[in-house]
Amino acid sequence: MKATRGPVVPQARSNRSSESNDATAPTKAQQQMTQEEFEPTPFWVAFATYFSYVMLFLFGLLRDALRANNIEEVKSAKELDKLKDFTSLYHGFESFFTRNMYRRVRDCFNRPICSVPGATLTLVERRTDDYGWTFTATGEKKECINLGSYNYLGFAENHGPCADATIEAIKTFGVTGSSSRADLGTTTLHRRLETSVARFVGKEDAVVFGMGFATNSTNMPVLVDKGCLLLSDELNHASLVLGARLTGATIKVFRHNDMEHLEGLLRSSIIEGQPRTGRAWKKILIVVEGVYSMEGSLVNLPDVIRLKKKYGAYVYLDEAHSIGALGPTGRGVVEHFGCDVNDVDIMMGTFTKSFGAAGGYIAADKAIIDSLRAHSHSQRYATAMAPPVAQQILSALAIISGEDGTTRGQERIRALARNSAYFRQAAQKMGFIVYGNDASPIVPVLIYHPAKNAALSRMMKDRGVAIVVVGYPATPIVESRARFCISAAHTREQLDHCLQALDECAGLLGLKYSLVHPPRSFADVKAIAHEASALV
């Protein structure tokens, strides 16, 4: 299972299967919601990007040769002579890439902060005197507009009702339960939270865990095992990839959101049966995400449900980036598409994004949740979710659902939708290649060239904007990008500042590659973006 996307596909795709005449076929409105933009990489840009990696590779070989002959000092981790007869700890291309390529741009990653990751944050300034091998803090700080954190609804706060309730929870329960849920780690807060989550997403029951990654990786083996078939989108998160590998099930990967490919795999797998024996599959599980965080793409849920019903499969939906952020009331991608929650068998989500907390949940029928409580490694062996974290989620959930008696939750959801539409439309109209769905709060802007990727990160920081840049191996080698995460907490003035800074950097670096949208300045497209956001 790969965590990277395959060849670029044509712009404005819907990825629907050609056979959709059955009664469960998606409506026209749902079809429009699945339209996404993936503009192909211009040939000359791809060539220049490949050439840059070739040059980095050649110079890396030269530097390694110099180090091997003691002409250049070796500052990377290396084997001790006394361990030469043991299996090597450092080998392969991964070590070469880290030593000769990643080191050059290390200053753009792992930046420490010393504030709440809200609409703004404070970076700890660092200095390197050896070209990225080591860093030291300068003692200076820099406040930046935060476009890198998953603070979708703005609950990353150290004041307000959520913070106040969390402080009271610490006074009552302490910081941790120091025990697993199967022993003495379950508090009244955990019970209330599970009931509230189940009610919010529309399922019979739910179970919560202290870590979002482990929610996928340690629970999927409880749901499927040997003799089952697991069909996974090629862009699924690493936690889903790991969880799938731990199940022992047969794994087949379908191209991202390609419903024809998924249906073909379903058909052939049912016809052929299990490997070697040809027996019928005990269970077929389709695993997808609500929002894919590298692409800003939404799952084609209506067609996934149609295929699930047609072939008797089950659906596992990871809503880590969509719960709270999508849908009129924040109930995720299921609500966004107007689908029936009962058509999604397993609903997983995390509390690290829209809720400003930590951990994750799985919601499903009571029988499934009871099985997870009995057999999940995270229930039996991991320390329970910290009570203050559970209270933070409960408080945020009450605001989102309106149970606090106010409309603050709805206001945050609408603000996120408007801000996302504004930023995406402005970036597209300025001439950037922007991936994904218009409803996504994640806006990936393609940079391609690794040197430009790092330069953009540094130049935006100099202009008071903290961003996340992503490159190989997290993305395909020619698709390095800046990933802008929009928040309801951002003001229009802050977004304007970020877009103006992006426009300035693009002019210096030459980043407006789109052949669909001709290059324009931010001043020229601001009114257009404002009109687009007003329609949300």
Image (cartoon, helix red, strand yellow):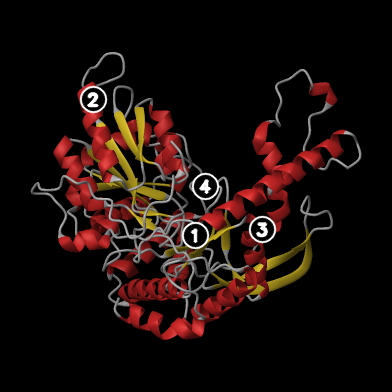
User: Where does label 1 land, which residue?
Assistant: 170
- Along the polypeptide, which appears first: circle 3 or circle 2? 2
Tell me the CA gap for discs 1 and 3. Answer: 46 Å
Tell me the CA gap for discs 4 and 1. Answer: 44 Å
Marking on residue 451: 3
Tell me the CA gap for discs 2 and 4. Answer: 35 Å
- Along the polypeptide, which appears first: circle 2 or circle 4? 2
Assign a secondary structure to mark 1: helix
Residue farthest to the front, as pictured: 44
Marking on residue 476: 4
Q: Is residue 434 left or right of residue 367?
A: right
- Along the polypeptide, which appears first: circle 1 or circle 2? 1
Q: Nearer the viewer, residue 235 or 325?
A: 235
Label 2: few (<14), some or many (≥20) within 10 Å? few
Amino acid type for the residue under numbered disc 3:
Ala
Residue drawn at x 17%, y 35% is 312
User: Quick check: 329 above or below 207?
Assistant: below
- Along the polypeptide, which appears first: circle 4 or circle 3? 3
Residue farthest to the right, as pictured: 71
Q: Nearer the viewer, mark 4 or mark 1?
A: 4
Q: Please report contact status of discs 1 and 2: CB closer than 8 Å, yes or no.
A: no
User: Quick check: 69 above or below 466?
Assistant: above
Number of numbered discs on residues: 4
Assign a secondary structure to mark 2: loop
User: Where does label 2 land, which residue?
Assistant: 282
Res 422 seen here: yes
